[in-house]
Image: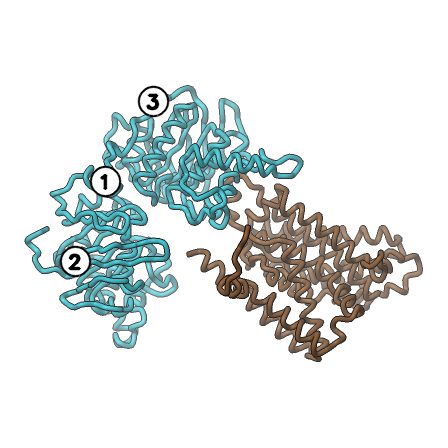
Chain colours: A brown, B cyan
């Protein structure tokens, strides 16, 4: 197929991908102003930051596609990180890792159980409910550690898997990047080929109609929160391995960044449409943006403000698109 | 034209309006005379709503002239048109639910009226003038739909309206409430106010309109006095061809028992019981809120119930959710197509394959080729008019959307098909296609439970009719033997 490239089609593309374009322009400016941007060291730095956030964002994609939201992932990260690292000595690193993932799964199942039993089928209700759960998970982490951080490097037994996840490379790619690729592949296949993947979209599109046509909507809710919990747990392990420390508040703020990455990637906040592939782009952009701003010397507080502004812009653009499609 | 009312309140001359890709109105001309009730009928997309929105100033016309009360009107806003004396009561009423009745009547004009006390006093006078006794201090959210309509009428009167346009006011009214509305419409007429009454229902046109205009595809086909047009003429003008009958011959294929329902009890339903035979169409007659929809939802497992006992093919079955229902050979086309039936943002293909998705899945994976086959087969079989299977279903007409939902269920070859308001808001031509389809389904051995607010539809299609009132079954009739009056009396039994 030959599509003609006209001025109009370029304008339309620019309008539909406003945020992506904006961040690319920022990257180009940065690479001129600050030659350090395109060095191998900095690009590796971007890749390392990509690790924890992308895990959460992938899980959050399923949640948002299903028409829900999960603010508890920050709390899950904190809880899983402290429990996993502290268990290396008593039960060994492999068992500790498994316990960590299982805790993530249980947290996710708990969320979905409360949503279904509480009848919180609206996105806004799920928002408050998971916010509450985030506070609970963080509190449990604080109680468990008596509010003190746990140091990975103080472990007396072998913690080589964590070191590998945090630092090692296989050829040119980091171990955490390989973990990401495996997760992406599995989630992408689920999303595009399977019954449960379709059910997520259908539930996000119109839960009432999907349920009346025999789609197992409640199972779908359980599934997406379980996946989100597991992905948060994997994210927690990647994060703790990289910084070699687990603190009971280390997950704070990650939930909003994950939502930002999903929405900037172009998954509709209202549910029904989206893809984990889009989220990969969204996450990359968010991290690149903060990296550029760091290099340009913009302070963290102004960066927070910019993130907020971009989230609002992304939602506004998406609503406008939905509105024009609706007519 | 009617010669008794020689002075038109509204004159529309050669008005045209185009939207991208559609000519919504093509040189439409219309005169409405003082003190007449002027009906406008037409299928969906005939241009009725566009015309009304031009009159109220929501849209601007492309060409043509409009005179209201002798003055040419040009580029008006909705507020200006109300102040001129032209009010529109939309189907989805425009009231603020959290405010009181009085405040709604004078919304945004409190200071003009001289404060809160005056607002309520003046609202009282207006409501009394149409014989409405609602307390002006009451919050609108507590009122029934018909009461809300009264408030809209009072609001229109507060602007000294000379012309009130009502857009399908009867669609959510009970028969009693409808009688009230007709009385008020006559009162308004006697006060010299003209009414434009837009409707789908031909009976209403013949019951109380003086003049009727038929529209089709953006054209005015004809304007006639009501005694100079027959029902069949009107229908053929609306659809552009002659339809011999509104309904196909009644199917006659009733066989042995397939479904026995006992003791459905919920908050609303009390010991609801009925049965259904193979090849039968069973009609449910009752008001909105009588329990007719609740009964089929309970049967289908859509709502939780306290107690119920269901036998399919003589065996007790447990139906706790729609998935159980589908496994036992049930299917349901729910009442509100857009909210409960369709996934508007999804393609026609995905909307049709929805109920069959389980059967298309092998070890968790969907067979997409089979999915397309199913969709293609149903699109063809039911004559769904769509550019392709990939088109978003939102872009199809109501009739074609409904056929797609029927296709979704027919693919499963259900033993029992529940149709809740299957022809609501769809045009005459598509209705007839759906009736033919129902006939075909039962003749091939399926059974249908039909719920409809249109009594003639139930009476003409059903083999047997059950009346429901206040959550109880109040009667059972053979529609060939019972009169409509007898059946309605049971449906309104209190």
Determine which residue is flagged by label 3.
B252
**Camera-side mark, 2 or 1:** 1
Label 1 lies in what chain?
Answer: B
Label 3 lies in what chain?
Answer: B
Q: Quadrant of residue A158?
A: bottom right
Q: CA distance from mark 1 to mark 3?
A: 27 Å
Q: Which mark is residue A244?
A: none
> In terms of sequence position, does the residue under pointer 3 or pointer 2 come before the other?
2
Q: Toward the viewer: B181 or A162?
A: A162
The picture places residue B270, in percent across and down from the top left corner, at 42, 37
> In terms of sequence position, does the residue under pointer 2 or pointer 1 come before the other?
2
Q: Position of B355 compared to B156: left or right?
A: right
Residue count near mark 2 (Cα–Cα under 10 Å), binned few <14, some 14–19, many ≥20: many
B261 vs A73: above or below: above
Q: Which mark is residue B194?
A: 2
Q: Quadrant of the C terminus of chain A?
A: bottom left
Determine which residue is flagged by label 1.
B235
The picture places residue B279, in percent across and down from the top left corner, at 40, 24
Residue occupying image coordinates x 26% and y 64%: B155
Label 2 lies in what chain?
Answer: B
Q: Toward the viewer: B176 or B199?
A: B199
Residue occupying image coordinates x 14% and y 47%: B224
């Amino acid at each position: 197929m030959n599509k003609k490239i006209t001025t109009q089609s370029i304008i339309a593309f620019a309008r539909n991908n406003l945020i992506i374009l904006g961040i690319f322009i920022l990257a180009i400016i940065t690479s001129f102003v600050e030659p350090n941007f395109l060095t191998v060291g900095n690009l590796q730095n971007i890749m390392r930051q990509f690790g924890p956030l992308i895990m959460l964002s992938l899980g959050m994609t399923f949640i948002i596609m299903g028409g829900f939201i999960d603010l508890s992932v920050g709390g899950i990260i904190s809880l899983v990180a402290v429990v996993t690292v502290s268990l290396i000595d008593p039960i060994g690193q492999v068992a500790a890792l498994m316990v960590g993932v299982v805790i993530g799964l249980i947290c996710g199942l708990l969320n979905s159980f409360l949503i279904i039993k509480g009848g919180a089928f609206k996105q806004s209700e799920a928002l408050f409910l998971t916010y509450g759960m985030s506070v609970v998970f963080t509190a449990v982490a604080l109680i468990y550690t008596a509010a003190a951080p746990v140091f990975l490097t103080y472990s007396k037994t072998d913690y080589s898997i964590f070191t590998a996840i945090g630092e090692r490379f296989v050829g040119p790619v980091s171990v955490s990047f390989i973990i990401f690729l495996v997760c992406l592949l599995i989630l992408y296949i689920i999303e595009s080929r399977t019954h449960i993947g379709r059910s997520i979209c259908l539930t996000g599109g119109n839960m009432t109609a999907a349920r009346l046509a025999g789609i197992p909507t409640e199972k779908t809710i359980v599934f997406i929160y379980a996946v989100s919990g597991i992905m948060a747990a994997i994210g927690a392990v990647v994060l703790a391995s990289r910084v070699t420390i687990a603190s009971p508040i280390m997950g704070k703020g990650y939930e909003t960044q994950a939502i930002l990455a999903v929405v900037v990637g172009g998954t509709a906040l209202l549910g029904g449409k989206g893809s984990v592939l889009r989220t990969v782009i969204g996450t990359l952009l968010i991290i690149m943006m903060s990296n550029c701003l760091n290099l340009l010397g913009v302070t963290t507080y102004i960066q927070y403000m910019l993130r907020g502004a971009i989230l609002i812009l992304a939602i506004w653009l998406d609503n406008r698109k939905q509105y024009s499609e609706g007519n | 034209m009617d010669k008794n009312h020689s002075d038109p309140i509204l004159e529309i001359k050669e008005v045209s309006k185009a939207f991208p890709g559609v000519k919504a109105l093509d040189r439409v001309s219309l005169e409405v005379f003082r003190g007449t009730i002027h009906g406008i009928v037409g299928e969906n997309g005939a241009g009725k709503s566009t015309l009304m929105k031009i009159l109220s100033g929501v849209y601007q016309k492309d060409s043509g002239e409009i005179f209201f009360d002798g003055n040419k009107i040009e580029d008006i806003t909705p507020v200006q048109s109300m102040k001129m004396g032209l009010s529109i009561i939309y189907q989805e009423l425009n009231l603020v639910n959290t405010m009181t009745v009085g405040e709604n009547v004078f919304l945004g004009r409190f200071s003009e009226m001289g404060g809160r006390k005056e607002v309520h006093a003046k609202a009282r006078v207006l409501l009394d003038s149409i014989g409405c006794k609602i307390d002006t201090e009451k919050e609108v959210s507590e009122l029934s739909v018909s009461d809300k309509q009264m408030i809209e009428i009072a609001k229109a009167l507060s602007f000294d309206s000379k012309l009130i346009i009502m857009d399908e006011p009867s669609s959510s009214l009970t028969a009693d409430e409808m009688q009230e509305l007709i009385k008020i419409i006559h009162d308004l007429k006697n006060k010299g106010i003209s009414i434009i009454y837009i409707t789908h229902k031909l009976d209403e046109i013949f019951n109380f309109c003086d003049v009727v205009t038929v529209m089709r595809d953006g054209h005015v086909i004809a304007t006639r006095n009501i005694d100079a047009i027959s029902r069949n003429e009107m229908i053929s003008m609306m659809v552009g061809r002659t339809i011999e009958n509104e309904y196909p011959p009644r199917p006659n294929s009733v066989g042995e028992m397939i479904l026995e329902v006992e003791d459905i009890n919920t908050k609303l339903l009390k010991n609801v019981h009925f049965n259904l035979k193979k090849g039968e169409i069973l009609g449910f007659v009752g008001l909105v809120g009588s329990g007719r929809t609740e009964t089929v939802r309970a049967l289908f497992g859509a709502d939780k119930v306290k107690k119920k006992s269901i036998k399919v093919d003589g065996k007790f079955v447990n139906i706790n959710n729609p998935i159980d229902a589908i496994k036992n050979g049930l299917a349901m086309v729910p009442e509100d197509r857009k909210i409960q039936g369709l996934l508007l943002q999804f393609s026609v293909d995905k909307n049709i394959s929805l109920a069959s998705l389980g059967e298309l899945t092998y070890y968790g994976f969907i067979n997409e080729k089979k999915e397309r086959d199913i969709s293609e087969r149903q699109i063809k079989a039911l004559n769904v008019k769509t550019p392709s299977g990939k088109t978003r279903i939102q872009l199809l007409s109501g009739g074609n959307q409904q056929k797609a939902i029927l296709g979704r269920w027919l693919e499963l070859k259900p033993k029992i098909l529940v149709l809740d308001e299957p022809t609501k808001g769809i045009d005459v031509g598509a209705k007839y296609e759906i009736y033919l389809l129902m006939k075909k389904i039962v003749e091939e051995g399926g059974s249908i439970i039909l719920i409809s607010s249109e009594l003639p539809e139930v009476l003409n299609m059903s083999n047997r009719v059950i009346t429901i009132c206040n959550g109880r079954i109040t009667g059972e009739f053979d529609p060939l033997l019972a009169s409509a009056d007898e059946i309605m009396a049971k449906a309104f039994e209190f």
